[in-house]
Amino acid sequence: MHVLFATAEVEPLVSTGGLAAASAGLVAALRRDGITVSPVVPGYSQWALTNETVTVLDVPAWVGPATVRVGNHPVAGEVHVIDIDSLRRPHPYVDPANGGGWRDNDHRFFAWSCAVAAWARVIEPDIVHLNDWHAATVLAHLDRSQRSVFSIHNLAHQGWGDPGWESLLGFEGATYRWSNSINAMAGAIALADRVVTVSPRYAAEICTDEGGMGLAPRLRARGDALVGILNGIDTDDWDPGLDPEIVSTYGSLSSASDLIAGKAANQAALCAELALDEGPGPLVVSVSRFDHQKGIDMVAEVTPLIVGAPARLALLGSGDRHTEAVLAELAERFGGRVAFRQGYDAALAHRMFAAGDLALIPSRFEPCGLTQMQAMRYGTIPIVTDVGGLHDTVIDVDSFGRTGTGIVMAAVSPAGIVDGVHRGVRLATNKARMARTRRRVMKIDWSWAAPARQYRRLYEGLMSGPDSLR
């Protein structure tokens, strides 16, 4: 089986968030399962590849000259990089000069998608698997006989364009017309043989008027062709037993005393690094983007109440500049109790999860989420909202004590956060209960093995016969 896997991001070549990690994890797992996968990415940079071949692509004039470089990357393996002049930028989507998206993002990714379709016609894969809006218009240029999967990683970003694009988007251009504009996701949702979201709960949520972000009617129309498959994480990278970034390794098979000692050593080191007090109260960590979806603005609103729980708070992330400024002020105001580091530092994220007692994830919506799984891998208990992939991965320990894996907030609100933290503090101060919960969550398999098997069955089903759900 040969799968062309088109994604705007894949680790370690380019990453701004979960899409890159999910793409890399799934591609690697599918390859381990014996599937030939050709990851196709935009050429934002001239990445060095070995054993490289270059092919000129047959694309319309509006795309511009396009070539595909196929070669080997030392970490990602074989990759297919499509080079078009408009793609080369210092950031895939955002103009650093003003913090907004590049004004020609529609052209850049519609052009890339057209080139991906041209490459698909050359290599003739069994399945074309497209990820998010950046690759959604590939299907405008392909015959419907080509079996296809479209993955929605985040419905909030849909790929809007001027209506004039319809005439340039191939023979399926009209399918992309939505609300008197062009909507890349709307077209792919209608055209793909299967539509996949990155958790089962999110698949249900986006079919509601409240969660569908304007596309619920088209999503509901797909019926059983819309499915949810939960993402995994790289359990080799996120492994407290082998992690080179932490001061004291430990694992799910460690003795109770070794686990307690490992967490304590890492917490002491992180507190020294971030100038945090070593008590009283548990250490709550948060690693996140700062945008409306992630709810960190609500955390900033109730930080004084979190400190009074009592708890200590360490935050890592960036995004909304107002939220960054408020958190910086709070860290100064509550010196020793609150620490904030702006940006994303992968090594620091590892140290925070190794040190933390609790991980706060207050998303307003969450297609899947990775940090709750990463945190649990390190025995750090998540406090989450009951949405999307958070619902699918965290079982409330107060409601289901023997199987509980975290704290599920009663409401997506500042009050819900405060209540969740207070419940987390009660859990953390009950040492025996906390130890049982830690060991339970550390034994969960969050690897890509199970998701890859689900994708394989999905691909095989498409290849086995006519698609009756079209």
Image (tube, rainbow, N blue to C red):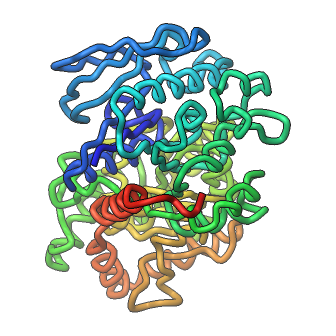
Residue 469 placement, left or right of 393 = right
Between residue 435 and residue 67, name the one nearer to us.
67
- State the residue at coordinates (68%, 48%): 292
Placement of 195 over or under 14, stated as above or below: below
Name of the residue lying farthest toward the right: 180
Quarter of the picture containing the C terminus is bottom right
Placement of 235 over or under 251, stated as above or below: above
- State the residue at coordinates (45%, 81%): 427
- State the residue at coordinates (35%, 81%): 437
Residue 368 in view (yes/no):
no
x, y percentage for residue 167? Answer: 72, 23
Placement of 405 over or under 238, stated as above or below: below
Placement of 420 over or under 284, stated as above or below: below
x, y percentage for residue 387? Answer: 60, 67
Residue 207: image quadrant is bottom right
Residue 301: image quadrant is bottom right
x, y percentage for residue 125? Answer: 35, 39
Residue 176 placement, left or right of 199 = right
Residue 315 in view (yes/no):
yes
